[in-house]
Image (cartoon, rainbow, N blue to C red):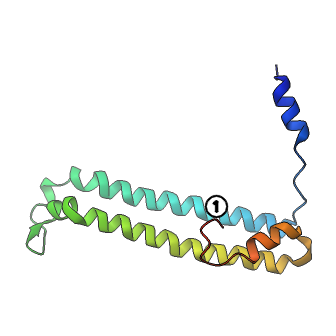
Amino acid sequence: MATPHADTLNSTLAPPPPVPAAMARAHRAYWRFNVALIAVLMTVGFVVSFGVPLFAQGLQHVRIAGFPLPFYFGAQGAILVYVTLIVIYIVLMQIADARLACAVAIAGDDVPANFAANVAESPPDDPVR
């Protein structure tokens, strides 16, 4: 049984504006890419966090700057990998954002004005976009 509050809340929401099929496809591709990228980067982070320590004994013979590889990863290598993952995410999402903005520009007048203004006219370094 639905609560009266939930019915009131749903009845006051305006329906979303119609979006062209091309724009819907662009959004689906954008979010599919975003989720896949996050999954890959999280997997790499997991392997660095848990995989290297699991195989630390077997990697003792590998040396970087005179230190055993497990020590290097524990002391500083893992942090460098995490920072690299963040930079990769930023760069690839900037490219994805530019592609989405291009799709909005191509869709032209078919896209609601407030949506086109928010995506196409946002500065490239705007973290909210």
Q: Nearer the viewer, residue 87 or 117?
A: 117
- Give amino acid for label 1: Arg
Q: Residue 37: percent from the left, percent from the top? A: 53, 63
Locate residue 82 relative to residue 102 in the image: left or right. left
Q: Secondary structure at mark 1?
A: helix
- Above or below, 10 against 69 in this view is above
Q: Counting other residues with Cα less than 10 Å from the Cα at mark 1, is it few (<14), some (14-19), or many (20 or more)?
A: few
Q: Residue 84: percent from the left, percent from the top? A: 38, 71
Which residue is rendered at x = 90% and y = 60% of the image? 18
Which residue is rendered at x = 91% and y = 37% of the image? 11
Q: Quadrant of residue 47?
A: bottom left
Which residue is rendered at x = 89% and y = 58% of the image? 17
Q: Residue 32: percent from the left, percent from the top? A: 64, 61
Question: Which residue is tagged 1?
Answer: 32
Q: Quadrant of residue 96?
A: bottom right
Q: Nearer the viewer, residue 12 or 58?
A: 12
Q: Residue 118: percent from the left, percent from the top? A: 76, 70
Locate residue 63 relative to residue 129 in the image: left or right. left
Q: Quadrant of residue 120?
A: bottom right
> Residue at the top extreme?
1
Q: Quadrant of the C terminus?
A: bottom right
Q: Quadrant of the N terminus?
A: top right
